[in-house]
């Protein structure tokens, strides 16, 4: 679907008319592409880095940008997203207390 959208936007780019909604679509598509590239760049170099504080800040920024852009799927791990409580341990493990 994204390839079809990209093809449509490339074809419409040479048009001699301007449609406000099309301009918004172009900008949103550009924003999404930039976000994907930044996320891939950060994630691709994640294990080679040792500046963990900066990595956390960059990943938090990527998640915030995803939320602003309406990206679905990644946000289930966002720290501000409420999580359901963990399931109880299986009965076979409950006889071994952790403390």
Image: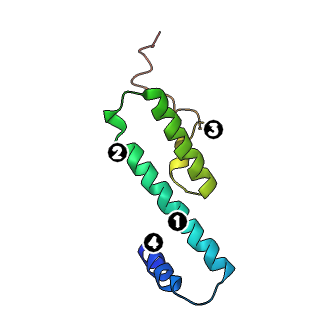
- C-alpha separation, residue under disc 3 versus residue under disc 4: 29 Å
Q: Which image quarter: residue 95?
A: top left
Q: Position of residue 45 (x, y in %)?
A: 34, 41
- Residue 47, above or below 71: above
Q: Evaluate if marks 3 and 2 touch, with contact meaning CB atoms under 8 Å apart.
A: no
Mark 4, secondary structure of its residue: helix
Please report whichever mark, 3 or 2, sits nearer to the chain's N-terminal start. 2
Q: Mark 3 points at which residue?
A: 80
Camera-side residue of 5 and 18: 18
Label 3 to label 2: alpha-carbon separation:
24 Å
Q: Earlier in the sequence, mark 1 or mark 4?
A: 4
Question: Closer to the camera: disc 4 or disc 2?
Answer: 2
Please tell me how crowded label 2 is: few (under 14), some (14-19), or many (20+) other residues with Cα within 10 Å.
few
Which residue is painted at 48% across and 27% down in the image? 53
In this view, the mark in front (1 or 4)? 1
Does any portion of residue 29 appear in the rendered image?
yes
Q: Distance between the residues labelled 3 and 1?
A: 27 Å
Q: In this view, does 67 lie above or below 3?
A: above
Instruction: Report which residue position mark 4 lands on.
Output: 2
Q: Is residue 76 shown to the viewer in this render?
A: no
Query: Residue 19: percent from the left, percent from the top?
Result: 66, 83
- Crowdedness of circle 1 by 10 Å Cα count: few (<14), some, many (20+)? few
Marks 1 and 2, how far apart at CA: 21 Å
- Which residue is under mark 2? 44
The residue that disc 1 covers is 30
Query: How far is disc 1 from disc 4 in space, using C-alphas?
Result: 12 Å
- Mark nearer the N terminus (4 vs 2): 4
């Amino acid at each position: 679907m994204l390839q079809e959208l990209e093809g449509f936007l490339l074809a419409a780019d040479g048009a001699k008319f301007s449609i406000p909604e099309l301009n918004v679509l172009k900008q949103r598509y550009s924003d999404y592409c930039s976000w994907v590239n930044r996320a891939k760049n950060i994630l691709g170099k994640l294990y080679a880095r040792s500046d963990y504080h900066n990595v956390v800040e960059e990943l938090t920024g990527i998640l915030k940008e995803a939320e602003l852009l309406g990206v679905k799927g990644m946000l289930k791990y966002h720290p501000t997203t409420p999580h359901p409580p963990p399931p109880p341990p299986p009965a076979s493990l409950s006889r071994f207390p952790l403390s």
